[in-house]
Image: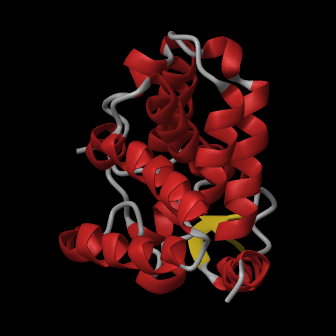
Amino acid sequence: MNRLEKQLQFILEIDKVKKIIRQTPLSDASRKENDAEHSWHIALMAYLLQEYAEEPVEVSKVMLMVLIHDLVEIDAGDTYAYDEEGAKTKDERERKAADHIFGMLPEDQGMYLKALWEEFEAYETAEAKYAHLLDNFQPLLLNDAAGGISWTEHQVKKSQIYKRNEKVEETSATIWKCMQDKIDKHIQAGHVLDE
């Protein structure tokens, strides 16, 4: 295959991300969102909320990072944030998927996107930390808007939410305070279990 054929094959392959249904509801609770909707949403959030990041970030890099971060779920499937059993095999499944998905592209583009995905997974750079903050904040915002429906459905505990978001404060104290306020509201409403 020539370069264009590989790129087009990849473009058609990633269309499948629209079929990966997440556990997060839309803000009106009418249905659950898919991975493409989630990625688009946090890419726009990356631009809008950059002023709250504790460290300066290259927003265009973060936007591309969040647009590709869940492409591996085409092969690996979505692992719900609080699925302890699924988390045991998540890394292996996603790494294998990354090799396949990004390997479809011409070598230069495939290597760049895979390296960007690996940077996101490593959670070390300012961009990766900010991308993770967005990846965690967006479902929390939607759950809040939808009346805590996903937390109630999965009987999520405060400790689980806090553990998942333990690094958010170092990335943005402002966003972390906002998240805490929303979590506390749903504890009071009985949507999040306080143990």
Q: Give residue 176's position: percent from left, percent from top.
A: 49, 23
Q: Residue at coordinates 67% horizontally, 85% vertically from top-left?
A: 13
User: How are the colours assigned in the image?
Assistant: secondary structure
Q: Quick check: can you spot residue 144?
A: no
Q: Residue at coordinates 40% horizontally, 74% vertically from top-left?
A: 99
User: 113 above or below 116?
Assistant: below
Q: Give residue 114's position: percent from left, percent from top.
A: 47, 58
Q: Residue at coordinates 44% horizontally, 50% vertically from top-left?
A: 115
User: 125 above or below 9?
Assistant: above
Determine whether, in the image, residue 48 is placed left or right of residue 25.
right
> Where, by quadrant of the figure, is residue 56 drawn?
top right
Q: Quick check: can you spot residue 114?
A: yes
Q: Residue at coordinates 55% horizontally, 46% vertically from top-left?
A: 135
Determine whether, in the image, residue 121 is placed left or right of residue 33.
left
Quarter of the figure with the C terminus: top left
Q: Give residue 140's position: percent from left, percent from top.
A: 57, 46
In this view of the protein, which residue sits in the foreground, 159 or 134?
134
> Where, by quadrant of the figure, is residue 42 drawn?
top right
Determine whether, in the image, residue 34 is placed left or right of residue 174.
right
